[in-house]
Image: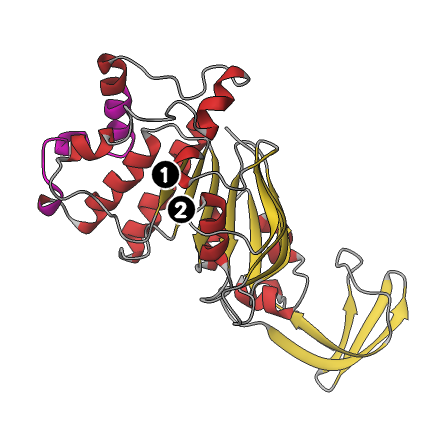
Amino acid sequence: MATVTVRSVSKQYGRNPPVLRSVDLDVAEGEFLVLVGPSGSGKTTLLRLVAGLDRVSAGEILLNGRSVAGVAPHHRDLAMVFQGESLFPQMTVRQNLAFGLSEKNPKGSFAHGLRKWIPGWGLKGSAAEKDHQIGRAASWLGIESMLDRWPSELSGGERQRVALGRAVVRNPAAFLLDEPMSGLDSHLRRRLADDFREIQRQLRTTTIMVTHEAGQALRLADRIAVLRAGELLQVGTPQEVYCQPVNRYVADLLGSTDLNTLDGELGGSGSERVFCSAAGTVRLSGKVPVPQVTGRVTLAFRAEDLRLELALH
């Protein structure tokens, strides 16, 4: 396992507007963090910076508290899975899973240096041990019967399972997932995501996943980081970002339906807050956090939180 720290990281290409703007983020050991936001929000760029596929324009990225500035991607011991399965067509499933095991953490690499202070880090095993790793990953992902088949003989979902298996079998410091299931139908996408989440819980491997699907983020994440136009708006548990969004954008992004809104006047004080609008008067429960302000406001609420009561006179 590893911690991943992003300190004041910005990314800009030439004279174009910044893709990321001073992002600060801490990912704990074993945590499953999901980056969510629309296209162009900077999710994949941030993942590529952590992986070392791009260089930061400002700030720094640390793995287990050590800066990885100048460290090549293949020396960071991070397994990245892209949107496409990216399998080697000339290799069988078994060979695809085994790729990189023999050269994992080469001498002189950043990951190799971690061995002396993290017991068991990246140890090379015997052929039998490697076969065991491959068999275990294949069993977890339900592809043990496909080990001697070619990628061209597999369905899209099966190929994506092999791609995930290739990451799992390496036992990396962290998984970086860039919408790896986006090309699958909704039922298969959900099932594969849930299967991988269960594997991640067993391995307790730090994971950063990119998605634009709010439902997937809410279902899988330990914490969610919401991005918009390169800015980090909110980081919190699924419960926190859904029930206590920092602004209307986050609330809309993570809701299954659009928010309902009413314009009106907010009055009262303490636990006796009252909202008055053309639709009527609403007494706000003390269980709901309400800003200590008065005057013209917009009341936003989700459909599932609405309760109708019929009063007979």
42 up-or-down from 148: above or below: below
Crowding around mark 1 (Cα neighbors within 10 Å: few <14, some 14 to 19, many 20+) is some
Number of numbered callouts drawn: 2
Residue 220 in view here: no
Q: Which residues are magenta?
A: 133-152
Q: Which residue is mark 1?
A: 196
Q: Which residue is mark 2?
A: 177
- Residue 206: image x %, image y %? 49, 35
- Name the kind of residue labelled 2 in the image: Leu
Residue at screen point 40% across, 46% down: 177
Q: Which mark is residue 93?
A: none
In this orientation, which residue lies closer to the viewer: 151 or 240?
151
Question: Disc 2 and disc 1: Cα gap in Å?
Answer: 11 Å
What secondary structure is marked by label 2? strand
Tags 2 and 1 touching, CB below 8 Å: yes
- Residue 207: image x %, image y %? 47, 39
The C terminus lies in which quarter of the figure?
bottom right
What secondary structure is marked by label 1? helix
Task: Choose top left, top right, bottom left or bottom right for residue 159.
Answer: top left
Q: Nearer the viewer, mark 2 or mark 1?
A: 2
- Name the kind of residue labelled 1 in the image: Phe
Residue 248 in view here: yes
Task: Choose top left, top right, bottom left or bottom right for residue 18.
Answer: bottom right
- Residue 28: image x %, image y %? 59, 35
Residue at screen point 10% across, 47% down: 152
Residue at screen point 72% across, 82% down: 263
Determine whether, in the image, residue 219 is placed left or right of residue 241. Answer: left
Determine whether, in the image, residue 184 is placed left or right of residue 114. Answer: left
Color style of the picture: secondary structure
